[in-house]
Image (cartoon, rainbow, N blue to C red):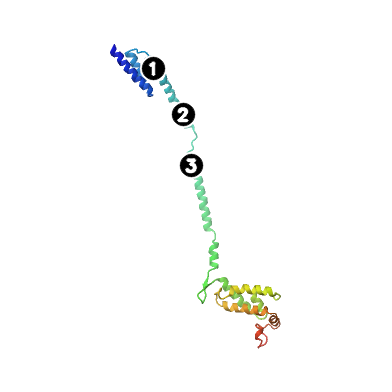
């Protein structure tokens, strides 16, 4: 009988340790075994405590399952990245379309570059089409008879001294040999200088307007064209 009592005590101790560590089912088993071997005082109470805890744990299991169920009922946001991805792809497509539009658009830079493409003059310096154009304009204005000086400077016959000076400075700056290397630029520069020298002098301008001589200082051969 003493042997059973010792064994019962051992089972009780094992059951108590199992109960403390959360092994409820093992605790119930050991407490039940202890009572069968010998009715030690307090074991029955421990067994009831373990059984209640075991039932509680079983409810907890249900609760856990309920939690799992609740988790399963939560809205699934996994589609959100796809939407974001679609949006990002759409944005990328828009950027691609914009890039394509920009690439297909006419290049104003290229046009500007081509219009200012320079050539090389006899002195090895570059000149632009605009510089060549102004040279041609002046040389063309120089020809054509009476009133050529006014046409060279691009002014009216009624222009005053200030207007004559302003027109001359503008053209001289564009045609000066240090600035313009286009063919015949020096000839155009001289034509502008002669026109200014004639029209800026009141006496010479009067003679020029009356007789049409290109250079009133050289009045040796009658009237000019």
x and y percent of residue 141 in the render? 63, 77
Residue found 53% across the figure and 66% down from its top: 113
Q: Position of residue 138 (x, y in %)?
A: 61, 76
Determine whether the residue tagged by mark 3 lies in a helix, strand or loop.
helix
Q: Residue at x 48, y 42 (%)?
A: 82
Question: Dot 3: within a 10 Å radius of its alpha carbon, few (fewer than 14), some, or many (20 or more) residues?
Answer: few
**Mark 1 or 2, which is nearer the eye?**
1
Query: In terms of secondary structure, where does tag 1 sit?
Result: helix
Quadrant of the image occupied by residue 107: bottom right
If you read the primary sequence from the N terminus, does the residue marked by circle 1 or circle 3 appear first? 1
Local packing at callout 1 (Cα closer than 10 Å; few below 14, some 14-19, many 20+) is some
- Foreground mark, 1 or 3, reads 1
* Residue at which label 3 appears: 81
On screen, residue 126 above or below 66:
below
Instruction: Tell me which numbered mark, 1 or 2, is placed earlier along the sequence.
Output: 1
Quarter holding the N terminus is top left
In this rendering, the answer to whether 73 lies above or below 221 is above
Above/below status of 96 relative to 169: above
Residue at figure coordinates x 33%, y 18% from the top left: 11
Task: Check residue 90 in the rendering and tell me which mark sits there, or answer none.
Answer: none
Identify the mark at residue 67; answer none if there is no mark.
Answer: 2
Which residue is at a point 69% across and 75% down the rendered structure image?
161
Q: Give the CA distance from mark 2 to mark 3.
A: 26 Å
Q: Earlier in the sequence, mark 2 or mark 3?
A: 2
Asked where in the image residue 209 lies, by quadrant, the reply is: bottom right
Which residue does the numbered mark 1 point to in the structure image? 46
Contact (Cβ within 8 Å) of mark 2 with mark 3: no
């Amino acid at each position: 009988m003493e042997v059973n009592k010792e064994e019962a005590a051992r089972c009780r101790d094992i059951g108590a340790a199992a109960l403390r560590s959360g092994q409820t089912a093992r605790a119930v088993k050991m407490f039940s075994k202890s009572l069968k071997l010998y009715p030690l005082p307090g074991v029955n109470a421990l067994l009831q405590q373990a059984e209640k805890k075991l039932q509680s744990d079983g409810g907890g299991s249900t609760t856990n399952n309920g939690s799992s169920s609740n988790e399963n009922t939560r809205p699934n946001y996994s589609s959100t990245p796809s939407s974001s991805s679609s949006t990002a792809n759409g944005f990328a497509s828009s950027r691609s379309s914009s890039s394509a539009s920009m690439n297909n658009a006419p290049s104003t830079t290229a046009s500007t570059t081509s219009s200012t493409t320079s050539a090389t003059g006899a002195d090895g310096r570059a000149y632009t089409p605009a510089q060549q154009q102004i040279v041609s304009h002046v040389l063309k204005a120089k020809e054509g008879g009476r009133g050529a000086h006014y046409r060279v400077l691009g002014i009216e016959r009624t222009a005053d001294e200030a207007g004559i000076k302003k027109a001359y400075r503008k053209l001289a700056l564009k045609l000066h040999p240090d600035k313009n290397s286009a063919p015949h630029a020096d000839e155009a520069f001289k034509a502008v200088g002669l026109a200014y020298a004639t029209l800026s002098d009141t006496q010479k301008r009067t003679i020029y307007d009356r007789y049409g001589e290109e250079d009133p200082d050289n009045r040796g051969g009658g009237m000019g064209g």
